[in-house]
Image (cartoon, rainbow, N blue to C red):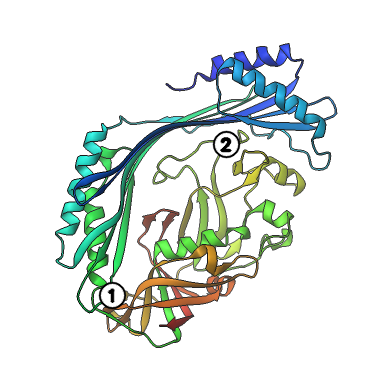
Amino acid sequence: MPTNIDNLATQVQAAAQRLSIGKYDIYGASVDDTSVQVDQGEPKQVKASNRSSVTVRVWNDAGRVGVTSTSEIDPAGLELALKTAYEASEFGIKDNAPDFSPEATTEISAPGEDTAPTSPVAELIEKLVGAEKQLLGAHAAIASVPYNGLSQRDVDRFYLNSQGARRHDIRSAASIYLYSKTEQDGKKPRSAGAFKVARNVAGLDIDGCIEEAAEKTISHLAYEKIKSGKYPVVLSADAFLSLMGAFSNLFNAQNILDKQSLSTQESLGTAIASPLISLYDDALHPENIGGETFDGEGTPTQRLPLIENGVLTHFLHSAGTAKRMKAQPTGHANMGSKVTVGRHFFHAMRGEPAEKTYNLDDADGVILIDDVQALHAGVQSLQGSFSLPFDGWLIENGKRTSIESATVAGDFLKLLNSILYVEEELELVGGGLAPRVWVEELSITGE
């Protein structure tokens, strides 16, 4: 049942008065999640869960803040959390203590509810079994779909504080993931996957997911080794945004203040990339299913330009980082035992027009990277370097040949500055929305 934010605010206010607490705020989220997995036509795993998490902050008369967390949203649980946070405030920090966001009470024009009906578990299993069967039948070499999943969720979020802020969001989302694997005598297993998301199960492009997974898997069957060297590279939307996410300390104000970033405060307004590329963080983009209208501090989210025509234009801020850097909060605070800063939904696109256009249909000696792997191990985010295994193809005279095994390495800032061309067509992937990006050259190491 959706949170009644007005009743909750009244109950919390009464509890705070009983405890003689004058300043507090509360951020909470509840997730109803149902997911299924199948194996060779049979249900493998069915999960249904309801998870709640609430963070309570209380300020004492000395301006120190205490923080506690709870999974209880009933009046008794919240009163206990207020009392615990108040007691903890005696040990709160003095320097750069968090405070309310100045934007926590400003009006939000975006709708706070975007829900859809849920589907019964039996329907989820039926659809996923059917998808697995179709994918297995797409080619004789496809022997299994070892990783798959169909899920639906409702997320209910709220924020309130003692100054009268009241925020409430409830949103629905559904997704399907299919990852197939081949088996052929005398050949290495090959694999590929696809992912789709929609407001609900009925809206999922399941056929498109099957087709994409099959097409990618089949394209890797005839593979060849590749010589090590420097190659012109085309990054898929997924590969480009994976790298952008791995080096997002470029934009993170908390990382910058902690000196854990490739940027400094003086980097704003400087060119960090080719003028051919622009990048936004846009929590409210129509393609961002389940997007948030406010962050953990109640600050409204927005479309924030990060790179415009190659120039670094904004950082991601919480209320605390914005105050320290004399900026405005941007709606990127994550509430927890401490406030952190994180991105929402990247939207990469063309910047300035390119002098020359490129096309994969007639490309020669170019490597198309479909996805990069092992980001947790192969990225040195503070040095700006990466060395990552990848799936992809060598393109010769427009013909694609799968690469047996290889890694791509480079410096991320050099990569951004060596962009040759940004394609027009955008693709929705897990990290956001982006086109394919052509890069002058990167180091490729074959097996």
Locate the C terminus by quadrant: bottom left
The residue tagged with tag 2: helix, strand or loop? loop
In the rendered structure, the answer to whether residue 43 lies left or right of residue 240 reads left
Distance between the alpha carbons at the discs numbered 1 and 2: 50 Å
Locate the N terminus by quadrant: top left
Q: What is the x, y in percent for residue 156? A: 47, 30
Q: Dot 1 corresponds to which residue?
A: 188
For the residue pair 357 and 340, the one nearer the viewer reads as 340
Q: What is the x, y in percent for residue 308? A: 55, 60
Question: What number of labels is visible?
Answer: 2
Q: Is residue 385 visible?
A: yes
Q: Is residue 106 visible?
A: no
In the rendered structure, the answer to whether residue 54 lies left or right of residue 122 reads right
Residue drawn 18% across and 58% down?
136
Mark 1, mark 2: which one is toward the viewer? 1
Where residue 9 sits, quadrant-wise, is top right
For the residue pair 46 and 359, the one nearer the viewer reads as 46
Where residue 27 sits, quadrant-wise, is top right
Looking at the image, is mark 1 or mark 2 earlier in the sequence? 1
Q: Dot 2 corresponds to which residue?
A: 300
Task: Give the amino acid at mark 2.
Answer: Pro
For the residue pair 256 and 123, the one nearer the viewer reads as 123
Numbered label attached to residue 73: none
Q: What is the x, y in percent for residue 435? A: 40, 62
Where residue 74 sits, quadrant-wise, is top right
In the rendered structure, the answer to whether residue 216 lies left or right of residue 50 reads left
